[in-house]
Amino acid sequence: MLKLEEQQSLGEASCALSEIVTKPNRSLTLDLVRRVESVSSTHSQHHGKLTVHAEECFSSRTTAEMMLSCLDLESKDLFSKCDPFLVISKLVESGISIPVCKTEVLKNDHNPTWKPVFLNIQQVGSKDSPLVIECFNFNSNGKHDLIGKVQKSLADLEKIHSGREGENLFLPTLVGHDCENKILKSKLFVENFSETIQHTFLDYLAGGVELNFMVAIDFTASNGNPRLPDSLHYIDPSGRQNAYQKAIYEVGEVLQFYDTDKCFPAWGFGARPIDGPVSHCFNLNGSNNYCKVEGIRGIMMAYTSALFNVSLAGPTLFGHVINKAALIASQSLADEAQKYFVLLIITDGVVTDLQETKDALVKASDLPLSILIVGVGGADFKEMEILDADKGERLESSTGRVASRDIVQFVPFRDVQG
């Protein structure tokens, strides 16, 4: 969820895949260099090392969910607190351990219960592959103290869960020249263990689900006069596509292959049809009762025709088109049809009815509907990212209801064009 451009780069390394897989243990350690140095300087400073390990994976759709806890963790010294966290690593053929999962740190807790962890079977190799679960005491300097560890497979952990008995942690201890495992009184428990199969997009298609594509286009005045070349709606006599046409074509070309009838509902919003009030959801084809057009070419023709038959107005309201799309999706659900709907909204600006839009999205979050909002032009779309709940905060309606899932993806077209 982190935006990379907002993070400080520590360095980078590059190599060919063949360099890794031809190593005896399939591991390669590379020097990290800063991006500027990698281009402009031959004497790059030392910025640490990065080890890359490669292995062949066998496809698995099964994911194990576990809730882990510990009892009677020991403090490393008399006055220190215990701030424990777990690191789960898999053991590979060469004997080295590769970390695959880490829990959160729990402050001052000798009997911690961590949030659930999710492990894909493909991630760990198989259900019988050995895993090392290490419990560390967190130190802010990065030198974390090992409290103890266990070595178990997922199958073993499932048995620990069903037996309701914990597993004693051990601590490798040097005795003379030998290393022995000292058994500790601290125990690891598996509070919950469940497996789920993650179905893929292709599974749903094979099961008979149809995708249905819908499009809504922003006809507000902020796009500029369509007859002038600086307008986002300008139709170039040379045939060069404007931003709206490019967005329709690039998204529609992908989705149309999954749409069986290739007839798409197409709407406009924020314009005044001839001799009428401003409409925030009108049929792009000009019809009063039929909103569908045939194929991407049909959308393009209806869009061009609409530009000559409406006056650009405002404000920018999304609520009406989202509710219209949601109505179609809910009718399909009531008919028990195996259909999933994707609404493409193309807009040049910030939405005016933010709370109404949130209400519509929260209401639609239970329906077989996803909404792709594409921002065209050079506007600042930061407010639009509120609707795209990618940072983990689910949308909330004015009545306090929280969206059951995130159904919106916002993309500035300038970032993905081509």
Image (cartoon, helix red, strand yellow):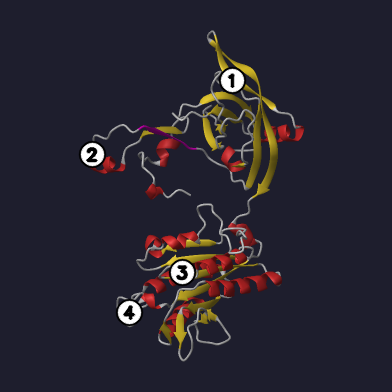
Q: CA distance from mark 2 to mark 4?
A: 46 Å
Which range is magenta? 48-54
Does label 1 or label 3 sit earlier along the sequence? 1
Nearer mark to the viewer, of 3 and 2: 3
Residue appearing at x 48%, y 30% in the figure = 25
Residue 82: x %, y % from top left: 57, 27
Asked whether disc 1 touches disc 3, contact meaning CB atoms under 8 Å apart, the reply is no
Does label 3 or label 2 sit earlier along the sequence? 2
Nearer mark to the viewer, of 1 and 2: 1
Say which amino acid is labelled 2.
Ser
Does label 3 or label 4 sit earlier along the sequence? 4
Q: CA distance from mark 3 to mark 4?
A: 27 Å
Give the answer, above or below, for where 304 lies relative to 69.
below
Residue linked to disc 2: 41
Nearer mark to the viewer, of 4 and 1: 1
Residue linked to disc 3: 351
Residue appearing at x 72%, y 35% in the figure = 161
Between residues 216 and 397, which one lies in front from this camera angle? 397
Q: Decide if residue 335 is on the left or right side of residue 95.
A: right
Say which amino acid is labelled 4.
Asp
